[in-house]
Amino acid sequence: MRILVFNAGSSSLKFGLYDIAGTETLRVKGGFDRFHDGSCDLKLTVDGAHHRLRAPHGDLAAAIAAVPGILAAQGIDGINAIGHRIAHGGALFDKPAVLDTSTLARVEQLTPLAPLHNPANLAGVALARQVWPDLPQVGVFDTSFHLSAPEFSTTYAVPQAWRDAGLRRFGFHGTSHKYVGLRAAEVIGQPLDRLQIVSCHLGNGASVCAINRGRSMDSSMGLTPLEGLVMGTRSGDVDPGAFGFLSRRLGLTIEEIESALYTDSGLKALTGSPDMRDAEDRAAQGDTAAQLAIEIYAYRARKYIGAYAAAMGGIDALVFTGGIGENSASMRRRICDGLEFMGVTLDIDRNQRVDLADRAAPELQSWGSRVRVIVTETQEQLQIARETATALAVMRPARLVLPVAVSARHVHLCQEHVEALFGPGATLTPEFPLRQPGNFAAHQKVTIEGPKGALHQVRILGPTRSRTQIEVSRTDTFALGVEAPVRLSGDLDATPKIRLKGPAGSIETDGLIIAARHIHMHPDDAERWGVADREEVEVRVTGTGRGMTFSGVIVRVQPTAFTEMHIDTDEANAAGISGGAEGALITAD
Ligand SMILES: Nc1ncnc2c1ncn2[C@@H]1O[C@H](COP(=O)(O)OP(=O)(O)O)[C@@H](O)[C@H]1O
Ligand SMILES: CC(=O)OP(=O)(O)O
Ligand SMILES: [Mg+2]
């Protein structure tokens, strides 16, 4: 299988074309970086021969657009699939995914959490979809590798409501850390699942990862690629108290602070240039600001290495990769200086004479060092090609996995009832958006009153509808003392009456139902999975501790749907789901 890979980073575009079929052959690879004044550096490797030139591409978009021409000039054709690096995949993508309209919409939603990366990644996808509309486009996510990390390393100690809103640690550079872990295990000659490794990806973005027996246990990056190490233009760790301080002292807004932490901090803030080569040159000429920056950089990295060695109870290997990790002998030395206490001793000559040609991964430790010190080129593109090939092999037939969301009891109101309950002229005011586009949870709440009891503080979901509809669980109907039929949303004829009470009045209305379990499905997914609107399918929910299969799940194909199954709280309790889960669709064939 011939796979073209796009890897758009925060300061560079790399691409590679690989034949993956038992063996792994690199046909062409290229990297654009140092964009300024309408040009950039281009390194090109074609069938083993290296070329370096200054190319007329002033930014990432121009570089992306140049790739088809470069391939055509080499007479390359017969590409089977495109693999894309996607930096932020959130909690949903624990493995590569085909990038169709609905997966791209999900990636788009994560853009605020990776503002330097996801837009660049998506620009690559958009171009590739235009140039190669018939080829599968697969996203390989930086975050996937870290989703196996334990809760104690991914949870911030912040209010529950913030955590419910999705505030958690993710970690990035996962594809690189995974490749580097595998390569280190090859060099050491032991299976990865027996090794404890600290991997240092030191590029323009930089992160340290604790790889505990093959799984990411912790990463220095968090919710966004801003936490952790000093980077080219990013600050890494900063006391969150800085937000209040900067707002009060300098009158800065959240947007201004955030933007400066992403683009005007790190080496750039400390030395004037985001590039470690410049910092090292200036430091060598006696520039004290550059010397301090290098010390800060090394010190921060060393602290994380020590922390992760403690987290895993010791390490077998320390691995360096990324532009700085691969090329800066002096930075590797500064970072390792002082780590002798934990068994890391660097051989100064070996460290100085690193040659990474032909996927070499030389060992740099001195005789008697307990910990292996390894440097290797990160082959993110190769790893993305491997994962794209594997994903396409297992996706045929596609694994039909979709998120399962739990709908708590709620009410939809017609405008007339909004006014009856909240006063003349009242309208629903959104509190937060729901995942189905255009829908929101309103500020307003009502009481549902039945003959036996009442349900208080029941959420109203907007926008208003032509008919009022009250969705409760079967358990709720016992609390209310009424019976309700199981119905699809909108199917309200001959439904029982119930009383709703708001601050300005109360009404009696029909429309009480127990919602039939259903899937909101985007037309792309319906087509990919071969299911039609109103078709009934089975969905197997796993990984919840009380896995179960739901039958009679009704598919509702809607042009703007975010593909997602909805069940009520009784169903969620029966399946042991709290919050959300994933389900696999089981079709008739
Ligand atoms: N010979 C070198 N010595 C020191 N730093 C280097 C050297 N070569 C590259 N770098 C640094 O590597 C960083 C870029 O890393 P890279 O992994 O290519 O970036 P990206 O994260 O955009 O993929 C820059 O800070 C650059 O200065
Ligand atoms: C996530 C990240 O920081 O990536 P990069 O190193 O490409 O900037
Ligand atoms: Mg990078």
Image (cartoon, rainbow, N blue to C red):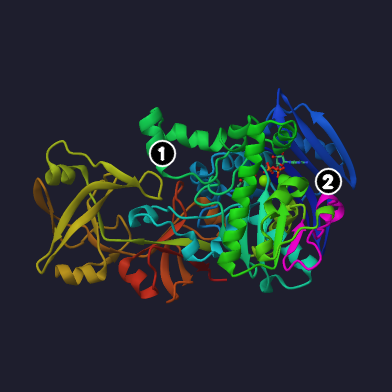
Q: Secondary structure at mark 2?
A: strand
Identify residue type, mark 2: Val
Residue at left offset 46%, top offset 47%: 559
Q: Secondary structure at mark 1?
A: helix
Q: Is residue 294 above or below residue 272?
A: below
The label shown at residue 28 is 2
Using the image as rendered, state which of residue 82 and residue 235 is in the foreground.
235
State the CA–CA distance, disc 1 to disc 2: 46 Å
Q: Is residue 558 above or below residue 567?
A: above
| Circle 1 or circle 2, nearest the eye | 1
Q: Is residue 362 magenta?
A: yes
Identify residue type, mark 1: Phe
Percent across and percent down for residue 361 are 81, 58
Residue at left offset 26%, top offset 44%: 464
Percent across and percent down for residue 555 are 44, 60
Identify the magenta region: 350-375
